[in-house]
Amino acid sequence: MRAPVTGTLDRAMPSGVKVVAETEGTGARAEKGDAVAFECAASLNKGSVIHARRAQNLVLGSRRFIPGVEYALVGMREGGYRKVRISPHLAYRDAGVEGKVPANAVLIYELWLKSVEKRGLTTASTRTRAKAARAGNAGR
């Protein structure tokens, strides 16, 4: 079963990933440094399936996944869905993946964001640490 799509798009993200379709979630927004749980399905631009929908876990910015997927997850909200087109320079480049992904292939990923665990420093925690540091230095 696929997530309902609020609209067909063709907008480019700053990273160069193209968002083809999107449904906004209602939970926390994923940011670099957050641990995310998501499901993804991948295919070649011409339609051949690379892998069916499967669960994945990742810390955004850890470089454990192709860059295009990490860029596409940033900014999504829990419960959200994105279908993206990823250019070769944000995927496997001219190396490809033997038997699965040809060299310089454009990939289509469908992403369903299940959960976001905030791990990075938030603005509030940064302010709290700065304030504590100033208070600690005041008595010197």
Image (tube, rainbow, N blue to C red):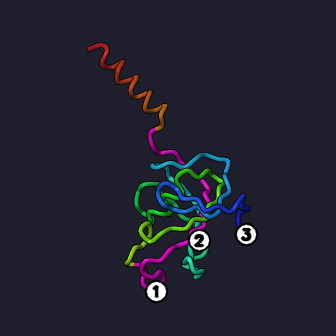
- Pointer 3 local density, CA inside 10 Å: few below 14, some 14–19, many at least 20: few
Q: What is the three-letter code of the residue carrying label 1?
A: Gly
Mark 3 or mark 1: name the one nearer the start of the chain. 3
* Distance of label 1 from label 2 (alpha carbons): 17 Å
The kind of secondary structure element at disc 3 is loop
Provide the residue designation for mark 3: 1
Mark 3 or mark 2: name the one nearer the start of the chain. 3
Provide the residue designation for mark 2: 41
Name the spot of residue 36 as percent of width and height, x first: 53, 55
User: Range of the magenta residues?
Assistant: 96-121
User: Measuring 73% from the left and 62% from the top, which residue is drawn there?
Assistant: 4
Provide the residue designation for mark 1: 99
Q: Quadrant of the N terminus?
A: bottom right
Name the spot of residue 97 as percent of width and height, x first: 43, 80
Q: What is the three-letter code of the residue carrying label 2?
A: Ala
Quarter-of-image position of residue 55:
bottom right
Q: Quadrant of the C terminus?
A: top left
Q: Looking at the image, how many numbered discs can be counted on the residues?
A: 3
* Distance of label 3 from label 1 (alpha carbons): 28 Å
Q: What is the three-letter code of the residue carrying label 3?
A: Met
36 lies above or below 103: above
**From the viewer's perspective, is 93 left or right of 43?**
left
- Pointer 1 local density, CA inside 10 Å: few below 14, some 14–19, many at least 20: few
The kind of secondary structure element at disc 1 is loop
Quarter-of-image position of residue 84:
bottom right
The answer to whether the residues at label 1 and label 2 have Cβ atoms under 8 Å apart is no
